[in-house]
Image: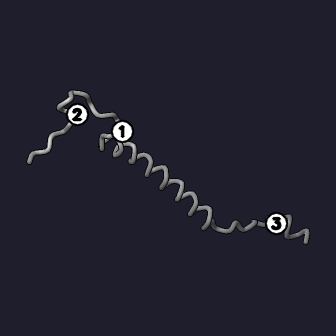
Amino acid sequence: MKKQNPHKISGQPAPWYKHAWVWFIIALPATAVVASLYTVYIAKQNAPQVIAKQNKFQLEKE
């Protein structure tokens, strides 16, 4: 038996949220945002320790 699309029979287009390509296009930038937030989280967790540089004046003072 052949399946027919009910939207083609009635002539009305489907709502925008029922099209797969819309969600694919939305998912591309959404995954980039999530990945960038995760990258920031990893960078914060594994940040290198900052070593205070002592200049010559501080060494002579001690």
Q: Which residue is mark 3?
A: 56
Q: Position of residue 40 (x, y in %)?
A: 57, 57
Amino acid at dot 3:
Lys
Q: Which residue occupies 82% across, 66% down?
A: 56
Res 52 label: none
52 or 23: which is nearer to us?
Answer: 23
Residue 11 position within the rendered picture, expressed as x and y whole percent measured from the top left: 21, 27
Q: Which of label 2 and label 1 is nearer to you?
A: 2
Q: Which residue is mark 2?
A: 7
Type of amino acid at the residue the image marks with label 2: His
In this picture, residue 42 sits left or right of residue 21: right
- Sequence-wise, which precedes: disc 1 or disc 3? 1
Q: Between disc 2 and disc 1, whose residue precedes? A: 2
Residue at image x 14%, y 44%? 3
Q: Residues within 10 Å of mark 1 (few under 14, many from 20)?
A: few
Residue 43 to residue 9: above or below: below
Q: Position of residue 4 (x, y in %)?
A: 15, 40
In front of the other: label 1 or label 3?
Answer: 1
The relative height of residue 45 versus residue 30 in the rendered view (above or below) is below
Relative depth, front residue between 16 and 22: 16
User: Badge 1 is on which residue?
Assistant: 17
Q: Position of residue 54 (x, y in %)?
A: 79, 67
Direction right: furthest residue = 61
Seen from this angle, which residue lies furthest front? 1
